[in-house]
Structures are given as structure tokens and as C-alpha cells.
Image (cartoon, rainbow, N blue to C red):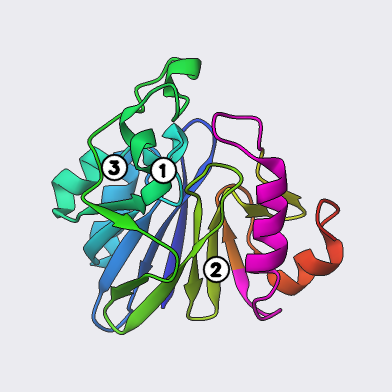
Amino acid sequence: MEVYRMEVSPLATNCYLAFDGETKDGIVIDPGGDADRIEKAIDAKGVNVVAIINTHGHWDHIGANGEIKAKTGAPVYIHTDDAVYLTDPALNISGMVGVRGAGAAADGLLNEGDTVRFGRCSLRVIHTPGHTPGGVSLYGEGALFSGDTLFFRSIGRSDLPGGDYQALIRSVREKLFVLDDDTVVYTGHGIPTRIGDEKSGNPFVR
């Protein structure tokens, strides 16, 4: 699996293009804005986008869903518990910050244990609530796309609509820290890290 990272939206959200280097089938994870940049990356890498995956429903992770869907024809997926966030500005917080962040409903819903497949690659859906009720992480191929659940030496905030601090801590400890220590963590903001490094060095859940 090849991974290409772009910082998009005013909040420097990490949008990922993950794809099979041989078949060129791939997915876009968290297209939060700057659709033109994402589209140029898709074209430059020659990727056939088969799905758009939102790790959760905040505006800075969903803002370019519609434009990327229009370009690629790929369906949009989000966890069942965050589906309403896509169309509700109060929940996705676009209304709070005065940006256009609400869009169309999801084409498909994700749940714990589902598998996202593209080419010869596959990622397992891990439900990691806390930042939002339907936050997910995607795990496989030696990588974890953690959305806003786990960051380098930090964790996601839990003071936004639907946030739950204790649920967030449980998600990190019980769902993510049980993964292989060498797993590369591609975070929703900031630089990548590894599970083992966060288990030993993250001050919030060490």
C-alpha cells in the first residue's frame, strides 16, 4: 500500500490518498477541503478512487466530499453513528466557525469490523468513539489511519458536540494500543507516529 499525505482545510487536516501501487485502485481518506489539490494528486498518482472515507464527521474532514465524489464517482462512507454529522452544521461544527461544511448524506455506512478493500489492499474498520460518537480508525498493511482519535504525543479533543473524554481514552487504550508496536499511525493532524512510541511517550494515555 502506498500512502500520500496532503494538508488541507484551514486547520491543516491530513487528507490521505491510500492506494495499491500495482493496480492503482485507492481511497481518499478525509478530504476536508482544497479539492483542487486533492484532485491534482489523484491525477498525478494515476489513482482510480473506489471510495471516499471519512474518519468522522467534522467539517475539516468532510469539506471536499462532494467535489471529490463528483470528480471520481466514488461513494462516500462514514460510521453509522456519525452519518447525521454530514448534513448538520451544528454537529459538524461548520456552523460554529462560519464555513460551508455540510453536504450530502453518505452513500454507505461503516461499522466495527467492516473491511475497506482497494486493489490488493484492505483496511479494517475500528470504531474509536470519543472525539465523535462515530469516529473510526482504519487498520491494515502495517498502518493505522487514526483520524482525530490519536496524534503524535496527544489525543483528540472531546469538548465538541458528541465528544466523550472517557470513551476517547478507552478507544486509544483498548482499541489502538493493542495493535502491533511497529504500526505506523497516520494521524488526522500533524506528523505520523507509531503505536509503540505513543504507548511509551503519550502523556495523555501513557
Under mark 1, the amino acid is Asp
Q: What residue is shown at x 41% (from left), y 43% (from top)? A: 82
Q: Is residue 193 above or below residue 52?
A: below
- Label 3: few (<14), some or many (≥20) within 10 Å? many
| Quadrant of res 153 | bottom right
Q: Which residue is mark 3?
A: 65
Q: What residue is shown at x 55% (from left), y 29% (from top)? A: 161
Q: Which residue is mark 2?
A: 144
Disc 1 on helix, strand or loop? helix
Q: Earlier in the sequence, mark 3 or mark 1?
A: 3
- Is residue 63 visible from the viewing direction of this image? no
Residue 188: assigned label: none
- Label 1: few (<14), some or many (≥20) within 10 Å? many
Q: What residue is shown at x 48% (from left), y 81% (from top)? A: 141
Q: CA distance from mark 2 to mark 1?
A: 20 Å
Q: How many marks?
A: 3
- Most foreground residue, 86 or 174: 174
Locate residue 71, reporting x and y percent.
16, 48
Give the extent of the magenta segment: 158-184
- Most foreground residue, 11 or 85: 85
Locate residue 44, reporting x and y percent.
28, 61
Q: Quadrant of the N terminus?
A: bottom left
In-image side of 127 versus 40 (left or right): right
Q: Which residue is mark 1?
A: 82
